Each structure stands twice: as C-alpha cells, then as structure tokens.
Amino acid sequence: MTNSVFSADLLPIHALIEAEQQAFIADEGGRKRAGYFCAYTPPEILNAAGLRHARLFKAGSPEIVSQGERYTQSVFCDFSKSCIGAFDKEGGDPFYHAVDKLYTFHTCASMKRAAEVIEQFVPTTLLNLPRLRNEAASRDFFRSEILHYRDDVAELVGRAVTDSEVSAQIALYNKVRRLLRDFSELRKRPNPPLTGLDFLELVRGFYYLPPATLLTAYEKLYQKLARTHDDGSRPIRLMISGSIMADGDRRLVELIEREIGARVVVEDHCTGYRPFAHTLREDGDPFAALADGYLDQAPCARMKPLDDSLDFSTGLAEEYGVDGVIYVYLKFCACYGVSKLEFLDRLTASGVPVLEISSDYSVSDIGQLKTRVEAFLEVLQGQRDDRIETNSKEHVHG
Amino acid sequence: MKANDVFGDDLVATLPQITTIGVDIGSRQAKAALIGGGSVHTAITASGVDSQETADRLVNRLLRQAGVTRDDLGFVVGTGYGRIALSYEDVPTTIVTEISCHAMGAHALNRGTRTIIDIGGQDAKAIRVDPENGRVIEFIMNDKCAAGTGRFLERIAELLGYTLEELGERSLESDKKIDISSQCVVFAESEVISLKAKGERPQDIAAAIHLASARRVRNLVNRLGLDPEIVFCGGVSNNLGMKQALESLVGHPFTTPKLDMVYAGAVGAAVLAQRHYQAGHA
C-alpha cells in the first residue's frame, strides 16, 4: 500500500507491518518462513514452532492476475489467479518468493488447483478441511489433519513441537482475537472511533505480525481509541459481507468511506471481523481444541450447513445496528457467487437492505461501482430521514 | 410542453415557482431538462469528452428555448455517468445518481410507476420505486458486461447495415425465429456474422438479438419482482424491437408516459432540483 487509507493513529502499526514484511523478505534471523492462504489454518502451530509466518492474501493488482492467468482458465476467481501470479518466478511478489513452505487447508476447488500449480514454485503441503462442521467424525478427522500439519511443521524446523507449546499459543492467540473483538466492539458506537479501513489494517497486522509484537502495539492503540470523544456525527452504517477482501483490494471500502462518507462498521468475511469471533478452549488436548475451535468459528460459505453462515451474517448485521449490507463477491467465486441468493434473500427477509456487487481486480468498472454504491446510500439516507421524520412526528403528537 | 400536461396538475401544484435544470450526462448521450414558467423543455446531444462543456452547451440551449437567463436559475442537479465533473459557481448545484433521478423522473411522468427498466449506453438496471414519493426502494444494475445495452445494439446494427432506429423497426418484420445462444457481446457478434453468412435475413437476426438481449436483461432484473406499472427508460427504450421482446418476456405491457423516456433521468434531476430549491427556501 503506497498511500495510507487508514487513520493517522494506525501509522505506527502500519510501520511495524512494513518492517516485518521487509524482515520476512530479507530473511533476518534466518528463521524458516511459512505462508498460508486460508483462515482455517491455525497459525498457533506455526508460531509454536518459532517460524516466521504470514497469511498470503495480497491481491488487487491486475498485472499479478494476468500473470496467474497463464496457468488457469479464465473462470478462476482473481484471488486464486493472484496467488499463482505472486508465486510465479517471473514478475511475482518478492514476499511470496521468500516463503520456504506453503500450507493450505483445502479451501475451494479453485484454491486447491491454485495450490497444485504453486507446488512447482515452492514446497507445499495440502491438508484436508472437512466441510460438515457439525459431525463428530469431522472433528476427529480435522484433529488428525492438524496433527499432520504439526508433524510437517516440526520437520520444517527440525525439532519437535510440544503440546504445551501449542497450548501456550492457543492462549496467546485467544488474547489477540479477544483484543480484535474489543476493537470491533468500539464500532458499535453511533460514531465509531475507527473506520472500516482502520479495522482492515488491524486485520493485516494480525496476519503479518508476531502476536507478542501485536499485543503491545494494539493494546496501546485500543486505549487511545476507546477514549475518543464523540463529535456527534452519525454516519450511515454498513456491513460488508461475502468473499475474501484481499490485502490490496481496498477500492470498495475507500469509495464508501473516503468518497461518500459512510462507515463500514463490521465485516462478515474472512479478512475482516469474522476470524475473530471465536475463542478456543485453553484446557485439555490442544489439538482437539484447535479442531473444534476452527470448525466452530464463524463459517465460510463453503461449510455445511449454509444456514450457519446465514444465521451468523444476519445476526451480525443486527448486532452492529447496520443501515444496510453490501454483499460483495469475486466473479467466479464458487462459494459466495453461488450462494449469493441465499444470503441476499435471508438478509432482505431480516429487514436489512442489501446491495449485491460482483467484483474483480480490474479497474474498468469503477464508474458503475460508484453509481451503485452511491445510489444505495441515497436509498439508505432516504430511509433514515423518513425514520427521523416519523419519530419526530410521533414525538410532537405523543 | 406544458408542465401540467407532462406531469399532471397534482405534481405541478407542489412545485415552487422557480426555474431548475436537470443534466444527465450518459455514456453515449447527454440529456437535459428545464422546468419553469409552467413548461418543460428538453435537449439532447452526444456526450463530449468534457462533461462540463457538454453540460454548459445543453444548459445554454435550454435557457434560450425557455427564454430565461442564467440569473433565473434556482437550482441545477447533475446526474449520469459524467455527473462527477459537474459544478457551477453561480447556481446552487448538487449531484444525484441516475438511479434516484430515473426513479423520480418516471414517477413524475407517470404516478403509478412501481418498476423501471432502464437501458442506457452501457448499463441496464431495474429500479423499484415507491409510488407515493418517487423514491428508490431497491435496484439492480449490471456490472461491466455490456450485453443488451445501447453500445451493444449499436454494434449489431452496424453489422447488419442498419441505423440504430432501423434495428428496432426492422426486427418487427421478422417471421422466423432464430436462437442466439450467446449472452456475451463478443461471441454474439461472431454469431451474427455466421448467421449472415448462412443467409439468414437481417430482420430475423435483429429480432433474435433483441430476444437474447431482453432475456439477459430479464435475468438480471428478475429478482426485483417487476410489479406493474412498468416504465421503460433510457436510450434503448426507443428501440421498438427491444421493447416488444422485453414485454413478452416480462409478460406485462409497459406504460408509456407522454415524454420520450430517454429524458427520464434529466426530468427526474430537474424535479429533484425543484425539491432541493424548496428545501433551501422553506
């Protein structure tokens, strides 16, 4: 990110992230570097092994997409193309080139195929993620996959990863997730002290920074934000729901917050609030805790039953008192593109206006994107004005 | 035209006695409407490179038509694809999306409007309108796919050796049903070329293109429910072949207001300008 789109308060955190990424590329300290794609990959194990690690979700550049497109059909989503393109030795991303080992829990069909292409660039371990999240057998199976993952990580670092190390990391990450929930909680205020762009930057930090570094910096920021004085403005409140919003894909939120002046107050996607909604058990078998915790997290739309995802989405919209939802998915997304009608219908039925946007990383549709978002906000503003008018009338006559 | 004829007495009675203009800069054509002195005036031109310059030209033309001066102007609302570039120092101006303007325009021109299908130069949209006040309830708009839009039909007309007006009219002469399977502009184009090579009549190909485009638009807008009365707006609303194809797919005839619906957005903008003026002088 070249120009900062988040508030000045986050500059120190942004600087930490940039420094960590430089250290990752420069191989400072000579620690092995692991990468992963999906929010179903427990970083607890990577951190327990003392690896440098990062979630790989940089995307948004059309050049990287076309780089990846050389290996796929056109009907892969731009994110999966970007993952391949970034690993490609010619013209890829130096951050991805620095990865010694890639872990990927079987996400969607496109990402699985992407990982199989990427195998030619970097050693990759593909792990299974059961989709039927409520079945007991899924939990046992996922636990055994997490054990495979631990063994693979142990081999990478050349030493055993102990149960107590993993347990300690579960407790540490719980603390971090709780803190991010606290940040998000501040957005329930009528005038949130942090923007949606700010929260996305905090999520970047979660996926790039070592948790201990993160806690120190974030706790300080939280204290500051919590004390922010309410200047009385009441921006229109939006939830973004749908597929991944990559690190580098900021144009929708920038449009909403910086051009139109509304606020994203919560995200129902795996690169916003959603990965922080759960807390893991801290006692007993740490691997069972990881399996249960990650299967019980607010589910991605590829998990079954889909009703769980729909319930979470509508519940979140209500909890944060949003005026409207923008449901945005990447073109060709096999999860969020296909289940869009279920989401749209359920949210509409719950009384929340929804705008559907299918998006990619090209720039040619910015005009249409702007028209749609602006018109949606005109509708929401009109509804809010009506409510205020009705309330004041009731007040006069009451 | 007399405002009372175009809008009806009830709406005119609620408007302030002031002159306002709505400017709708579309991707292909720029439209403007003036409301004032009991009349409605309209003007249209090709969208230039410079939106402000195009708008100035339209505004000056309307002022001449209405026989008023710039000083008489109470408010201007800019809308359409080129709306962002609009600003005037001497007249209060605001920018509203074409979705809200089309809704207000179709409401002002026909009070029973519940659904608008709007097909312009590069986009297609459906809007659910509150018949009480002309406000948008819900809308759907295509993304960057141009199938079925004005630009696409222009290209097909060229291929068939028709003007854009002829494309619609001649398609009504079709007596043979051809299936065009492709929904993509690029593929539909090559399908048209091979149909021509097979010796199919251009009238039949034109009808097939309209049906395929209408199907695509119908699929896009279906989720809104499409309650009557339905009004067809935008440049493509003048294409009779497209209108007929859409009506047959939707299963309901469209209501035709008293004004060319290419002006719906501009008229809506001018009505909103009246309301803005009113709010500022209450």
Image (cartoon, coloured by chain):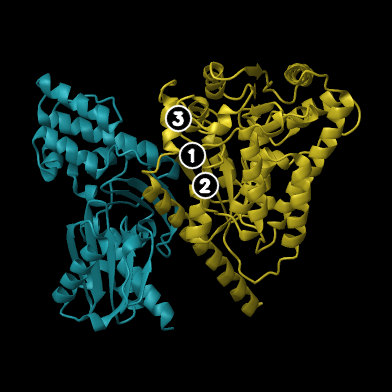
**Residue assigned mark 1:** A60
Residue B60, percent across and down? 18, 72
**Residue assigned mark 3:** A91
**Label 1: chain letter:** A
Ranked by sequence position, the earlier of labels 1 and 3 is: 1
Q: How far apart are marks 3 and 2 (CA)?
A: 22 Å
Residue A200, percent across and down? 62, 47
**Label 3: chain letter:** A
* B240 or A174: nearer the viewer: A174
Residues at marks 3 and 2 touching, judged by CB atoms closer than 8 Å: no
**Amino acid on which disc 2 is placed:** Arg
Chain B image colour: cyan
Placement of the C terminus of chain B among the 4 image quadrants:
bottom left
Residue A65 placement: quadrant: top left
Label 3: element kind: loop
Q: Which residue is drawn at 57% across and 30% down?
A: A96
Residue A359 placement: quadrant: top left
Placement of the N terminus of chain B among the 4 image quadrants:
bottom left
Q: How far apart are marks 1 and 3 (CA)?
A: 15 Å
Residue A205, percent across and down? 67, 44
**Amino acid on which disc 1 is placed:** Gly
Residue A201, percent across and down? 62, 48
Label 2: element kind: loop
Category of crowding for the residue at label 3, using alpha-carbon neighbours closer than 10 angstroms: few (below 14), some (14–19), many (at least 20): few
**Residue assigned mark 2:** A250
Q: Does any portion of residue A75 appear in the rendered image?
A: no
Of circles 1 and 3, which is in front? 3
**Label 2: chain letter:** A
